[in-house]
Image: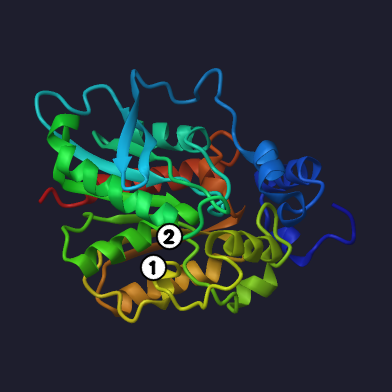
Amino acid sequence: MNDDAPAWWSLLDDDAQAAARLITRVLQKPARELGPQQTRALLNTAPSGESITPLDHVEQLTVPTRAGAIGARVYRADGAVSGGSGPALVYLHGGGFVLGTLDGADELCRAIAAGSGGWTVVSLEYRLAPENPYPAALEDCIDAYAWLTRRAPELGIDRERIAVGGDSAGGNLAAALCLHRREEGSALPVAQVLAYPAVDDTFTARSWSEFADAPLLSASDARWFWEQYVGVDHPGGDHLAAPLRAESLRDLPPALIITAEVDPIRDDAEAYGQRLRRDGVPVSLTRHTGVFHGFITEIGVFAQAKQAVDEVCQYLCKLPRG
């Protein structure tokens, strides 16, 4: 970068600076100007020819929902389930509710399955906006999670040890899923693993101005993504759309929350962790310095991605066994 580099540029580590330059070359216009289809074509990850983390047990699954069915992908390390059932993490990919695929979260899910000591990872698709606005994506996740809990024994999963997680928009959906299940009186996930979750709809925290032009996700693009999800006329304050707006976070599952230093969403995500703590929910909150939004899925690109994955794996391994 030149002398006109933004103030946050010096905060980025070498990996993040290199990735930011690449993003600038690929995305020559912001997502809000490109629109959903062109942004998907540029940013959605294509299937990789050879995985960084090979697993012998990766299978496709079709999961029924009220709107039809969605795709899912199940990841197991060797020996994850032998003659019984084991714990599982239901993972929801990011992408601003507009982008994202199972392939985009593939390396992350492989790494978690390989490093978590026997946890199965079930990665879910969900309907994308603006073609399918709120609450379509959340309903898909609610229905798929309920179906997985019912079918858990057939899938080699212990229904008493299912966690939910996601990054960015997926973190929003994971948090909203927990709120929904609490409110309907259903059994809760054993934990929620949230990477820089999008949890507020006010866009007023300091990080929104401090990192307004951050790489990959600018403040203006984030607002545009939000409008694609809820529509421009959404009244706001709906806690299942924006979980930070919930009146109470009591009795929700324990949480691991991971944030990125250079990210407009950072302060909202950390505020969610602080509110969970105030409401009596155990929270592990880690800010990863030197990186920007989206880093955790970039296995092999960011050294910090491996550190974050290791943190997720250690967190899952330490969860009580019931």
What's the residue at 68%, 74% (across, down)?
209
Q: Can residue 168 be seen in this view?
A: no
Query: Closer to the camera, 177 or 20?
Result: 177
Residue 164, compared with residue 152, is above or below; it is below
Residue at x 10% of width, y 51% of height: 322
- Could you tell me which secondary element the residue under label 1 belongs to? loop
Q: What residue type is labelled 2?
A: Pro
* Residue 23 location (% of width, % of height): 73, 44
- Give residue 313's quadrant in the image: top left
- Which residue in the structure is indicated by mark 2? 135
Is residue 195 at least partly visible in the picture?
Answer: yes
Residue name at image x 37 percent, y 49 percent: 140
**Please, what secondary structure does the residue beneath circle 2 have?**
loop
Number of the front mark, 1 or 2: 2
Confirm or deny contact between disc 1 and disc 2 (CB under 8 A): yes
Using residue 78 as the reference point, say whether residue 16 is left or right of it. right
**Between marks 1 and 2, how big is the CA–CA gap?**
9 Å
Q: If you read the primary sequence from the N terminus, does the residue marked by circle 1 or circle 2 appear first?
A: 2
**Which residue is labeled 1 in the image?**
240
Which amino acid type is shown beneath numbered disc 1? Leu
